[in-house]
Image (cartoon, rainbow, N blue to C red):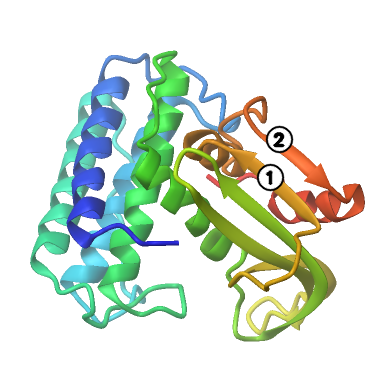
Amino acid sequence: MTRLPDAEYLRHIAQDSARFRAVLADCDPGTPVPSCPDWAARDLLWHLGEVQHFWGTMLRQRPVGPEDYSHAPVPETLAGLLDYFDEGARLLLDQLTSVDPAEETWTWSQDHTAGFILRRQAHEALIHRLDAELTAGAVTPLDPALAADGVDEALDVMFGGKPPWGTFTPLPQHVRVDIADRGESVWVQLGRFTGTDPESGTHHEDIDDLGVVPDPGTPADVVLTGPAGALDAWLWRRGEDTEISVAGDAEVYDRFRSCVNHPIN
């Protein structure tokens, strides 16, 4: 997959954040968010505001991590939530505009660069913009180039990212995701994950898992095909699979679904 230019990620953060705000500013704060069942519109507005404030702070104090980070109390009014969101969005955009994407900064990923935050926050803003539109009943299309990049990011980072304390054992099973309107594909290899979380002590034994891999040069066991926007929304459980076709081994597909069929807020 070809990554978007850094300037495009930045443009999308600004554009989708503005759309997110505009939609929720006109929405009853108590309206349920259908794609995040535990949230109302006010929770969604707070969430993205806090996320952007957090990552803007991480960039501003780079490479210091979040050990001493604390957020403000949750505002009680819609006006207060909007003001807090504006503050976080401005901080994040100001920091991303001035930083070299290669510069070292704290992240929860094994990629400790500002570029990781730039790409991750473009997709965070995109998906939560969709959440806001679903809440208000005013859905607009996802940008195909960003959504195609989001398919790769969802599979590689959100579902395929692995902590350093575990071991991934690959299986000889591959799924190819064809992004029909972009002429691109993402390959994933299925496998099993084992490890013990050193913080919680929780042990994971042979859990279904996946990882993004280069084209292995062999036929895929399963091929998923669909447009970028539909695939991205479906992987994030923000859309149905009506535009997505599946061909291949049903058992392999079921294992793939077990790896990606859980919510991400």
Q: Which residue is mark 2?
A: 245
User: Which labelled disc corresponds to residue 101?
Assistant: none
Position of 165 compared to 222: left or right?
Answer: left
Q: Residue 189 location in percent, x, y? A: 71, 68
| Residue furthest right as drawn | 251
Q: Residue 228 location in percent, x, y? A: 49, 40
Q: Is residue 68 visible?
A: yes
Residue 4 vertical placement versus 215 (above, below) = above
Q: Which residue is mark 1?
A: 224
Q: CB under 8 Å between callouts 1 and 2?
A: yes
In front: 92, or 181?
181
Category of crowding for the residue at label 1, using alpha-carbon neighbours closer than 10 angstroms: few (below 14), some (14–19), many (at least 20):
many
Label 2 SS: strand
Label 1 SS: strand
State how far apart marks 1 and 2 are (Cα).
6 Å
Position of 12 compared to 38: left or right?
Answer: left
Q: Earlier in the sequence, mark 1 or mark 2?
A: 1
Question: Can you tell which quarter of the image residue 28 is in?
Answer: top left
Residue at (79% x, 43% y) in the render: 247
Q: Is residue 70 visible?
A: no
Question: Can you tell which quarter of the image residue 224 is in?
Answer: top right
Q: Identity of the amino acid at label 1?
A: Leu
Position of 203 compared to 216: left or right?
Answer: right
Tally of numbered tags: 2
The N terminus - image quarter: bottom left
Category of crowding for the residue at label 2, using alpha-carbon neighbours closer than 10 angstroms: few (below 14), some (14–19), many (at least 20):
few
In front: 252, or 60?
252
Residue at (21% x, 49% y) in the render: 88
Q: Residue 109 location in percent, x, y? A: 46, 74
Residue at (58% x, 70% y) in the render: 161
Residue 252 vertical placement versus 238 (above, below) = below
